[in-house]
Amino acid sequence: MMDEFAPDMIIEPLLVEKAVAGRRGYLFPALDVPAAPALDSRYARTGSARLPEASELDTVRHFSRLSTMAYGVDYGFYPLGSCTMKYNPKVNEEAASLDGFASVHPLQDEDTVQGSLALMYRTIEDLSELVGMKWGTLQGCAGAHGEYTGLKTIRTYFLHRNEMNRNKILIPVSAHGTNPASASMNGFEVVQVASDERGLVDIEDLKSKLDETVAGIMLTNPNTLGLFEKDIRKIASLVHEAGGLLYYDGANFNALMGMARPGDMGFDVVHLNLHKTFSTPHGGGGPGSGPVLVKEELVPYLPQPDIVFHKSTGRYAFKWNPKTSCGKVSGFWGNFLVIVRAYTYILCMGSDGLKAASQHAVLNANYMQAALRKVFPVAYDGLCKHEFVLTLEAMKEETGVSALDLAKGLVDMGIHPPTMYFPMIVHEALMFEPTESESKDTLDHACEAMKSLKETAYSDPEALHNAPCTAVITRVDEVRAAKSPVVRY
Amino acid sequence: MYSYIPHTEQETRAMLDAIGVKSLEDLFSDVKEAGCLLERPLDIEKGRSEEQTLDIIRGLAALNIKGVSFLGAGSYDHVIPSAVKSLSSLPAFSTAYTPYQPEISQGVLEAIFEYQSLICELTGMDVSNASLYDGASAAAEAASLAIADKRKSSRVVLSGTMHPFAIQCVKTWALGTGREVVVLPEKNGVNDYSSLESLLDDSAAAFIAQSPNRYGYLEDFTGVADLVHSRKCLFAISSDPLSLAMQKSQAEWGADIAFGDTQVLGIPMGFGGPYCGYMAVRQDLMRKIPGRIVGQTVDTEGRRAFVLTLQAREQHIKRERATSNICSNEALCSLTNVIYASLLGWEGLKEASSQSYSKAHYLAAGLKELGYCAGAGLAPFWCEFPVVFKSPEKLEEFTEEMKRNGIFSGVKLSRITLDRKDDSTLLVAVTEKRTREQLDRYLAIAKREAR
């Protein structure tokens, strides 16, 4: 592949393309013990590996330049729906960098890691209170991993109750793609539930699908349209009467902190996304953290080990629970340094701050929705929670300019595009989630940008077909990438 | 206290007016109508200043005690060059989302492409994904890939010398789903292959193993790939990626799937996470691998560009028929890996690997000389080896005395196997970071304890 491109067709060469034989970016001190006899040839590697040969400065410049070709929350508005791209406070980073956390081995004796254990214990306590659950686990490493863990806990619960006939998970058609994928990884059959004209769960359709084969329903509340499921208590009693459980996908929990709790609505299992609601950075796609919190009757089936506090000694400890636990879902105890950041955020915000965060997230979404409904139709209009969905179907028909084109136009105005073409029940969808971090003037600017882009769509559609024009590259050929994949040098 | 909300009172008022509601509470009228409004404050303390918060956090960090670490069993204290953290914390990397918009994500995408290439080079495989959560959960993904690859299969065979936490992850994946996990017995600390052929029955989809294994021993996979393939199964090997600078790669052993944990490539121990799982496969399994993949393409001007590709495998397209549910992975950790490997280069990786090897053998030889039963298996080891004590009490005395001298001397095997019979075995890991002085101090204390 290296020869395929003329030098001026390469934005930033791969570091390996600039390798200079023998150049090194890090040197180890000389070996200060006798060299051990070589590994038996039966086990020894014969092939080498082609890696960069670069100085420290070469490496620093390469990655620094790459970072100028990326866009983070620190650079501008990032209203990516369902992703909660709120500000990632710098104090969180300082906390996670403390040597007492960063340099600790996961299998040190428990008496040498009381700080880590206390922090995890208190995080579970606070998260449980926030969502109205009894207790939880921090082992999930991302949102989808939390879903997998929560559903596995449900599976194990029914296994112990000899109810393995419960083999179905109900999922609304508007749900995140991870929901059905997590259900099927757990061996469940996925049954879709329709949305009604309000954009909410269709109660009649739900009723028709409830029977003794249903293990539960997965819901996001507010849902992916940003709407609160007003019938949630009804839904909960219907599902519970049929013997099923309610799973709460916490992707959208930033709308409700301190205002409402899934546990009070009737949910039995919750996962949260610490990298969304609790301000830990997304890192270009992880690491996240997906804690799972459950009602009392499900606690025994959570992954192991649990963390316990012995009042008599004032000590924290791990507790393995092999008889009932579903086992392990990741290598050690979860993404600990992400949890440190989230706990720092909880300490800083407190109960009043967390509630204010949700209130202002909802304020910002409704403010933007009010301004933008004059520009594009809102897919399901009304009071929204933390996000809302516009449909650009009419503009597409009238001008040929799609939601994608308009999103690319936002890039030229310094704004990260909202989530596109989701949920699937809305045509030409753009889903905005401004979060509480953004100020009124940022929102005003974004709404003005949307308005002017719409004008451009009608006056000069070609300009938007060609957007963006200010980024380091123009639009890419996705078909070529998938048809003849080049996925390594 | 909560300074992360920028709204002034006047702005909030103006925004409420624009929406047409009177108060922030009114924005939750739907929640109230549904009877779901929380009518009391949360039982969580009120907010604090940044300094008050840091006081508490620093206090917790100070409760953790550090020592000179000879701990391993899945997490290792290797050298991390200063530039690694400095570059991986650049805010355009750390505060970005998944690179869905290629025009403004070329930096993230190119770094992932370099990471995928790194993993392919180390493992010898054709295609790597953009990362998984960690090495243990990657074992479950390997099992899942194999089951999906072979029609009507339901069984995976795991090596009994795999890390017990990885075995637990695979068993958890199988729990309640009709999938079956069977474990191959071990002999002298390595796989005993005598029953492998019979375990690989028609329902089996894969044999999954690990080297260096849970004791630190290297497994001899000679002939295993042929046997596994003759049973129409896939062969997956988990390896510490730094060990691959010395020992045969997964491709050299004839494996179909390579996976493991990249913590050793520049990621701090961090009490167990975040780490990063890698997975790479042969070309013909490319469309079955879980997780994101970055591919090369061109923009409309013909310039080289990178983009997320082969997405038809993934959950946001395929939903319940996706190869995995994974969405967020460990992108920033994989970036950390590629920065680390770029600084070291192949020569540096070989040096870190061989110095760890030599220092581990120096310590093991020293312990043997003092009469300890160290690394007594028949197989060679790389940077970690077991020491078997006469009794759990003897082990306890040894590790306590070490601890009093500021040394974390090893991981008691029962910490990971959860089996009392392993109470008298200590796993000792040595990295290139340990100095001669530290090794000799370890031996000096061991000498006192041996008496």
Image (cartoon, grey):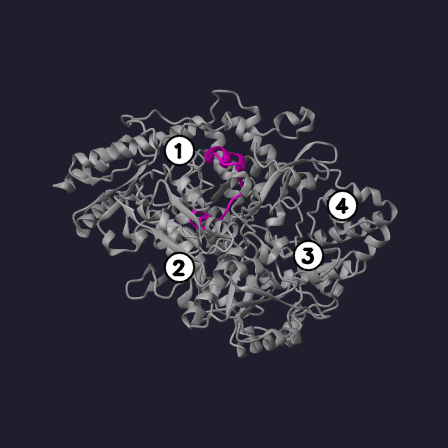
- Mark in the foreground, 3 or 1: 1
Q: Secondary structure at mark 2?
A: loop
Residue shown at 38%/31% (left/top)? B246
SS for callout 1: loop
Q: Which chain is home to disc 4?
A: A
Mark 3 surroundings within 10 Å by alpha-carbon count, few (fewer than 14), some (14 through 19), many (20 or more): many
Tell me how many marks there are. 4
Q: Answer yes or no: are tags 3 and 4 on the same subunit.
A: yes
Q: Which residue is mark 2?
A: A327
Element type at mark 4: helix
Question: Which residue is label 1 attached to?
Answer: B248
**In this rendering, the label closer to the viewer, 2 or 1:** 1
Disc 4 + disc 2, Cβ < 8 Å: no
If you read the primary sequence from the N terminus, does the residue marked by circle 4 or circle 2 appear first?
2
In the image, residue A197 lies in the stretch drawn in magenta: no
Question: Distance from label 3 to label 1 (Cα)?
Answer: 45 Å
| Residue A422, label in figure | 3
- Same chain, marks 3 and 2? yes
Of tags 3 and 4, which is closer to the observer? 3
Label number found at residue A129:
none
Judging by the rendered image, the residue that carries numbered circle 4 is A409
